[in-house]
């Protein structure tokens, strides 16, 4: 990993080539570290770009290190529909409950000082996820049921600890609310997987054969789902 020396500090960074960007940008996150994004440049030029922002990078690294892991604060990232989005906490003393608002690029969480507690913010976010799961996933289940000819009884959304979804003997499909964090490609795979269970209850050869009729690349998607953290 390339690095530069700034005073008594050493900054390690990685470069992510993004030819569609007009300028170069630097991000600092707990899980990915320092990333320089933009059009391809020489190593010398990349180092100069890092050095120009070295003071800011070190301040950002100190801030990230001081924040509790998974804390929902300004600058944190929240997973939603296959990506992680920037969080902005906005204080509004007139509010009696927390409001979670998602734009195309970030989450805005409005709250009063008295409500600025991690457990309350996380509860509000869970409620947001639950509402969005029903709103975004239900139409896709109906669409896939129509296109595959696989019919279910009813769909329910719950927080599940160890699985993304299930299908009951009476063909009630249960979707983990956490699935709203997945990309639509993986959500669709989850939907069809459970729809196939309305016809074949076990993970037999017949099940996988039926699944492959509707999702030919199911093996790749299944492996990706298996490796994802619930």
Image: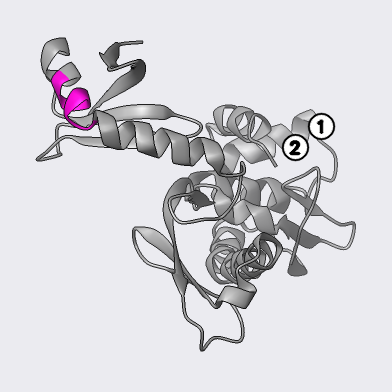
Q: Quadrant of the N terminus?
A: top left
Question: Where, by quadrant of the figure, is residue 27 drawn?
Answer: top left
Write the residue at 64% across / 29% down: 227
Q: Is residue 91 magenta?
A: no
Question: Where, by quadrant of the figure, is residue 36 drawn?
Answer: top left
Identify the element where label 1 is drawn.
loop
Write the residue at 66% across / 53% down: 178
| Image position of 5 with respect to 229: above or below | above
The location of residue 22, given as percent across then percent down, is: 9, 40
Question: Where, by quadrant of the figure, is residue 128 drawn?
Answer: bottom right
Q: Nearer the viewer, residue 7 or 191?
A: 7
The location of residue 201, given as percent across then percent down, is: 84, 45
67 horizontally vs 15: left or right? right
Q: Nearer the viewer, residue 157 or 181?
A: 181
CB contact under 8 Å: marks 2 and 1: yes
Which residue of the protein is positioned furthest toward the front in this rendering? 8
Q: Residues within 10 Å of mark 2 (few under 14, many from 20)?
A: some
Q: Which residues are magenta?
A: 48-53
Residue that badge 2 annotates? 207
Q: Nearer the viewer, residue 62 or 105?
A: 62
Q: Residues within 10 Å of mark 1 (few under 14, many from 20)?
A: few
7 horizontally vs 108: left or right? left
Which residue of the protein is positioned furthest toward the right in this rendering? 169
Q: How many marks?
A: 2
Residue that badge 1 annotates? 204
């Amino acid at each position: 990993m390339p690095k530069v020396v700034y005073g008594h500090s050493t900054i390690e960074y990685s470069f992510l080539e993004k030819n569609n960007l007009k300028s170069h940008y630097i991000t600092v996150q707990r899980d990915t570290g320092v990333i320089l994004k933009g059009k391809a440049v020489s190593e010398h030029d990349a180092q100069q770009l890092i050095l120009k922002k070295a003071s800011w990078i070190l301040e950002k690294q100190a801030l990230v290190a001081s924040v509790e892991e998974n804390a929902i604060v300004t600058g944190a990232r929240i997973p939603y529909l296959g990506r992680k989005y920037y969080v902005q906490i906005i204080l509004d003393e007139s509010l009696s409950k927390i409001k979670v608002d998602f734009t195309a690029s970030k989450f805005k969480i409005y709250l009063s000082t008295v409500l600025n507690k991690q457990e309350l913010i996380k509860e509000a976010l869970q409620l947001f996820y639950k509402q969005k799961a029903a709103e975004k996933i239900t139409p896709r289940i109906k669409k896939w049921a129509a296109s595959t000819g696989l019919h279910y009884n009813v769909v329910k959304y719950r927080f599940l600890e160890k699985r993304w979804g299930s299908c009951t003997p009476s063909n009630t499909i249960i979707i983990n609310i956490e699935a709203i964090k997945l990309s639509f490609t993986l959500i669709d795979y989850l939907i069809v997987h459970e729809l196939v269970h309305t016809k074949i209850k076990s993970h037999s050869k017949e099940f996988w054969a039926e699944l492959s009729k509707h999702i030919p690349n199911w093996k790749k998607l299944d492996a990706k789902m298996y490796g994802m953290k619930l």
